[in-house]
Amino acid sequence: MQTKLSRRNFFEPALGMVMLIVLPGCGGGGDTSLADAAAALGATPPAATPPEATPPATTPPATTPPATTPPATTPPAATPPATTPPTATPPATTPPTIPGASSCGAQFDFNHGHVLIIQLSDLNSTTPMSYDITGTADHAHTVTFSVTELAALKAGASVTVTSTTTFAHRHVITVSCV
């Protein structure tokens, strides 16, 4: 047996059920009961079923650990960076020209612990002389004097040399021997 189902036959029962639910809730008919509304639409209202008894929910006692608040930390006070100006080195004075000097002195353009010591015997060298000028600084530089520069120092003249570059800087040093 084949039954032809039209849209009207399909939607009519569903529409009736919706009307049963919506109309009494809208308060749009006075004293019409749910059964009367169903009968007017040609539908049978669903049988009323008592609600199932739901046991009361039991919630286990809360076992939330106590909240721990980290100790308050006060950030250190901002201290402006120290701006120490470089130590000013007095300008080199050229000592009088004295043949047969007894000591050599060095003036650095800016100094942070470097030292240059030239032995008087080195002034007689026939080859260039190199010196490490580390001193108390935390890094090394080297300066080299040519034979001509060593002879000029021996004669009492001032000689200016430039050190090797270390940590992105170098030194200009003026040397005189007296």
Image: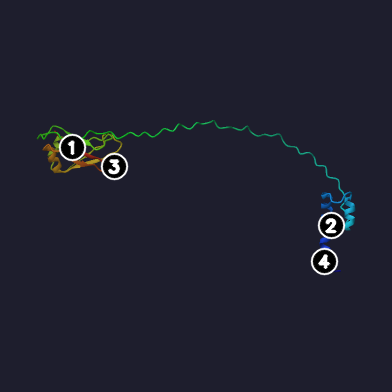
The local secondary structure at tag 2 comes to helix
Residue 143 sits in quarter: top left
Which one is closest to the eye, mark 2 or mark 4?
2
Tag 1 near tag 3, CB within 8 Å: no
Q: Which mark is residue 16?
A: 2
Residue beneath label 3, please?
169
Residue beneath label 4, please?
6
Q: What is the x, y in percent for residue 124?
A: 12, 39
Tag 4 near tag 1, CB within 8 Å: no
Measured Cα–Cα span from mark 4 to mark 3? 97 Å
Q: Which mark is residue 17?
A: none
Measured Cα–Cα span from mark 2 to mark 1? 114 Å
Is residue 154 left or right of 38 when viewed as pictured? left
Q: What is the x, y in percent for residue 153?
A: 14, 38
Q: Residue at x 82, y 66 (%)?
A: 6
- Mark 2 and mark 4 lie on one chain; the one further toward the N terminus is 4
The local secondary structure at tag 3 comes to loop
Q: What is the x, y in percent for residue 86?
A: 29, 35
The answer to whether residue 116 of the structure is visible from this angle is no
- Mark 2 and mark 1 lie on one chain; the one further toward the N terminus is 2
Q: In the picture shown, does residue 5 fall above or below 35?
A: below
Q: Which mark is residue 175?
A: 1
- Mark 4 and mark 3 lie on one chain; the one further toward the N terminus is 4
